[in-house]
Image: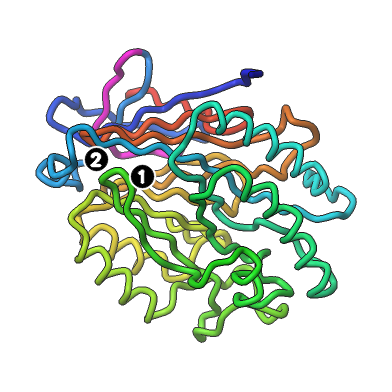
Amino acid sequence: MMFVNRQIAKVHFNSIKARGMQLTSKNGDPIQRRAFLRDGALVLSAGVVSSSLLQAKDDNSAVSFGVITDLHYADKPAAGSRYYRETPGKLAEAAENFSAQKPVFVVELGDFIDAAASVKTELGYLKRINRDFAAISKDRHYVLGNHCVDMLTKKEFLDGIEREKSYYSFDSGGVHFVVLDSCFRNDGESYGRKNFQWTDPNVPAAELDWLVEDLKATLNPTVVFAHQRLDVSNHYGVKNAAAVRKALEDSGKVLAVFQGHSHKNDLKAIGGIHYCTMVAMVEGKGTESNGYSMVKIESGGTIEISGFRKQASYDWPSK
């Protein structure tokens, strides 16, 4: 197998051995965490998650999963830095890597396809790229992005990937996973048929209520998957992100949020939760511009993120 550039960040959620540090992401944003270095990799602690919750996991449990985001597949010429027709080749490279590492499941974090002028064309894009994605793993998960439902309705997109719900939860390897859907206007109407502004993503009241109850019901440490960002208040962020973050923080169970949408690597820590924004697969010409990752959650709560190509190269020195 061909090996590609990989960056590894280890995120540890047992704060007992941690020493106080202030961390910054590569772009200089402060990360208020307690952290230490181990075996050359950065280890972050998350005091928001109780040690008893982590100990509730089976000592032998572990789960690994592959992550891709913002494929924007479309059979159309490149526009700016987005090379739509190169997505299948980039996905094939990720598939080869995932095949060797054997993740339990794979997840795409939204904007699976790009926009087209007709429903028929968008459905064609979806059928084409989902054929390749479905071949990677029988256990796979989809987060809705705004481009997934540009012309299509949510039902049309979900039918195309053979799924019933746009937000839901599941358990794997002693970890609880939550898939969120922020493709709603501020009036609660679902995105579809070009009826929205991409800068107006919201988690509606019914979904937020469901999230609170879902987190109450689980006994497991939790990871959340989202498309639009929950850690910023600019045009990339969910408009009611603060309310969503409060639900996550109040549960005391959420380890991390993985998200896409803004196409660039970023990491923030808010309220004891890591918000990891993944790089877009569509950006850049050639496989050297690819980006995808393997994530492993070990027993005891350590999360190891192995990024490939453009994905996840962080430098978080102590201050």
Residue at coordinates 19% horizontally, 25% vertically from top-left? 19
Q: Secondary structure at mark 2?
A: loop
Q: In the image, is residue 133 part of the stretch drawn in magenta?
A: no
Q: Check if mark 1's residue and mark 2's residue have beta carbons within 8 Å.
A: yes
Residue drawn 68% across the image and 49% down it: 71
> Magenta span: helix, strand or loop, mainly?
strand
Of the image marks 1 and 2, the number of the one nearer the N terminus: 2
Q: Position of residue 143 (x, y in %)?
A: 53, 59
Image coords of residue 278 (percent x, y): 54, 43
Q: Quadrant of the C terminus?
A: top left
| As drawn, 116 above or below 20 | below
Q: Position of residue 55 (x, y in %)?
A: 13, 40
Viewer-side residue, 90 vs 235? 90
Mark 1 secondary-structure assignment? strand
Disc 1 residue type (three-letter) = His
| Residue 36 covered by magenta stretch | yes
Task: Name the residue type under label 2.
Answer: Ala
Colouring style: rainbow
Marks counted in the figure total 2
The boundaries of the magenta stretch are 29-39
How much space separates mark 1 and mark 2, taking CA atoms?
Answer: 8 Å
Residue located beneath label 1 in the image: 274
Please determine whether, in this image, residue 279 is positioned above or below residue 15.
below
**Residue labelled with disc 2:** 46
